[in-house]
């Protein structure tokens, strides 16, 4: 049976054709890639912010990460690709990120943007991805673009920008790549004449307005009840067995469907497809579930994306800082992992009572947190309390408190705290981009 994602609504580019009562907030562009016979060969998945069939990209990494998250987490790759490969634009930042490994090499082509400047580490990364079974494509290739030989050896597909390539140069450019066994795709094909010229030059795949404009896919995002999320978080904090967690998630179908889609998207030939919610939970892991639910709690019913929600950004960066700092002070300690996990949870809970408008002790009673976390949150007691105070001090540049922390732990001097704070902020941006809409 074919796995399906969330219900998809296809919108034309003209707003007059959109039903006035439609409310949707997860968007994805999809443009077909065809072969010489006009048969569908693949889709390119594109960043879209709303129903408007155009992209306003200010950050390549964020846009690509959003496409990846929406394709895997909300729509479900199987539903939008229907057995065809999906091309996803990848900039240098995302190219280096291990998150790419959630993509199945059988389902996706990594389309390297023309803005990527290759250094030795990126060349090595491309070779490693190729060795792992991923197909790489070069985007927007023109006669003037320099492509290192090492990169050309690693890629499978070259996309030639027809609009930026004069007819006299096209055959020579295509021949350069086909003679080394590359598949050449002509993009920005807008007329019958351009299609025929690209065919004569030796291109085997085609994409452009002559065939089809991108369509906008829209998925509805279910809203979550804070009370229900609190109950689920309480269960997760108790380290439940998978059977109990499966029962609990069945009461949260929106979260359950997200988990199923993400787990299925990570399936490869080495793992069987996920068929049950139990299998999906085991594949994704309770640690990842905990963090999704924590983000949902802060997002609430707001329509503001997580990546630009200041409260979410603050609390995620705070939690990550505390996690990193805990690892730093507990290096070599067998319990370092436990301390770091407690530190992260402490940071995530430090503003939850404000969001839920509930008394902090009452919230902690409901969640049944440890005495150490309770003491840290209520009165900044113990190691966790000191780490929380350090995180709060860094946010407001309270040098006196930061100095006190440095005297307590040499590993957290002012320079180290600044370094960890920057790392936490960067991680927060990446995490909320990948989990936007959770």
Image (cartoon, grey):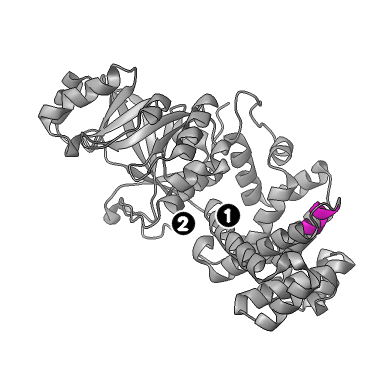
From where the camera sits, is residue 357 visible?
A: no
Crowding at dot 1, Cα within 10 Å, few <14 / some 14-19 / many 20+, comes out as: some
Q: Which residues are magenta?
A: 335-341
On the picture, is 175 further left or further right than 52?
left
Vertical side of 395 occupied by 334: above or below: above
Vertical side of 351 occupied by 109: above or below: above
Q: Percent x, y for residue 361? A: 82, 76
Q: Is residue 340 magenta?
A: yes
Q: Which residue is mark 1?
A: 431
In the image, 14 versus 41, the foreground residue is 41
Q: Is residue 127 magenta?
A: no
On the picture, is 346 further left or further right than 11?
right
On the picture, is 367 further left or further right than 356?
right
Q: Earlier in the sequence, mark 1 or mark 2?
A: 2
SS under mark 2 = loop
Q: Percent x, y for residue 205? A: 29, 25
From where the camera sits, is residue 19 visible?
A: yes
Q: Which residue is mark 2?
A: 25
Q: Percent x, y for residue 62? A: 45, 53
Q: Quadrant location of residue 389?
A: bottom right
For the residues labelled 1 and 2, the Cα–Cα distance comes to: 19 Å
Vertical side of 413 occupied by 247: above or below: above
On the picture, is 4 further left or further right than 293?
left
Residue positioned 71% across, 78% down in the render: 403
SS under mark 1 = helix
In the image, 399 versus 262, the foreground residue is 399
């Amino acid at each position: 049976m074919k796995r399906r994602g969330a219900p998809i609504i296809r919108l034309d580019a003209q707003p007059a054709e959109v039903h006035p009562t439609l409310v949707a907030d997860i968007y994805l562009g999809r443009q077909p890639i065809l072969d010489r016979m006009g048969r569908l060969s693949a889709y390119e998945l594109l960043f879209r912010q709303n129903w408007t069939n155009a992209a306003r990209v200010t950050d390549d990494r964020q846009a690509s990460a959003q496409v990846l998250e929406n394709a895997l987490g909300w729509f479900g790759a199987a539903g939008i690709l229907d057995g065809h490969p999906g091309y996803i634009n990848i900039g240098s930042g995302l190219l280096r990120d291990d998150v790419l490994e959630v993509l199945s090499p059988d389902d996706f082509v990594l389309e390297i943007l023309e803005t990527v400047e290759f250094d030795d580490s990126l060349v090595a990364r491309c070779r490693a991805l190729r060795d792992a079974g991923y197909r790489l494509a070069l985007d927007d290739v023109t006669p003037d673009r320099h492509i290192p030989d090492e990169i050309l050896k690693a890629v499978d597909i070259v996309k030639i920008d027809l609009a930026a390539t004069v007819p006299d140069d096209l055959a020579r450019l295509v021949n350069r790549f086909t003679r080394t066994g590359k598949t050449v795709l002509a993009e920005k094909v807008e007329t019958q004449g351009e299609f025929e010229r690209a065919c004569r030059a030796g291109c085997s795949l085609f994409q452009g307005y002559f065939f089809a404009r991108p369509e906008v896919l829209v998925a509805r995002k279910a809203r979550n009840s804070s009370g229900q999320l609190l109950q689920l978080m309480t269960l997760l904090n108790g380290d439940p067995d998978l059977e109990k967690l499966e029962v609990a998630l069945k009461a949260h179908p929106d979260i359950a469907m997200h988990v199923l889609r993400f787990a299925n998207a990570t399936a490869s030939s080495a793992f069987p497809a996920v068929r049950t919610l139990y299998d999906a939970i085991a594949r994704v892991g309770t640690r990842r579930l905990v963090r999704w639910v924590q983000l949902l709690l802060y997002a609430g019913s707001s329509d503001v994306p997580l990546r630009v929600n200041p409260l979410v950004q603050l609390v995620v960066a705070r939690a990550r800082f505390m996690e990193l700092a805990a690892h730093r002070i507990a290096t070599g300690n067998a319990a370092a992992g436990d301390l770091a996990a407690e530190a992260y949870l402490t940071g995530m809970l430090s503003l939850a009572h404000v969001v839920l408008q509930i008394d902090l002790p009452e919230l902690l009673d409901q969640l049944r947190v440890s005495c150490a976390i309770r003491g840290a949150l209520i009165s900044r007691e113990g190691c966790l309390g000191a780490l929380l105070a350090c995180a709060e001090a860094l946010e407001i540049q309270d040098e006196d408190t930061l100095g006190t922390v440095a005297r307590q732990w040499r590993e957290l001097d002012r320079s180290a705290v600044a370094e960890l704070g920057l790392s936490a902020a960067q991680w927060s941006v990446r995490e909320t981009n990948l989990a936007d809409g959770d």
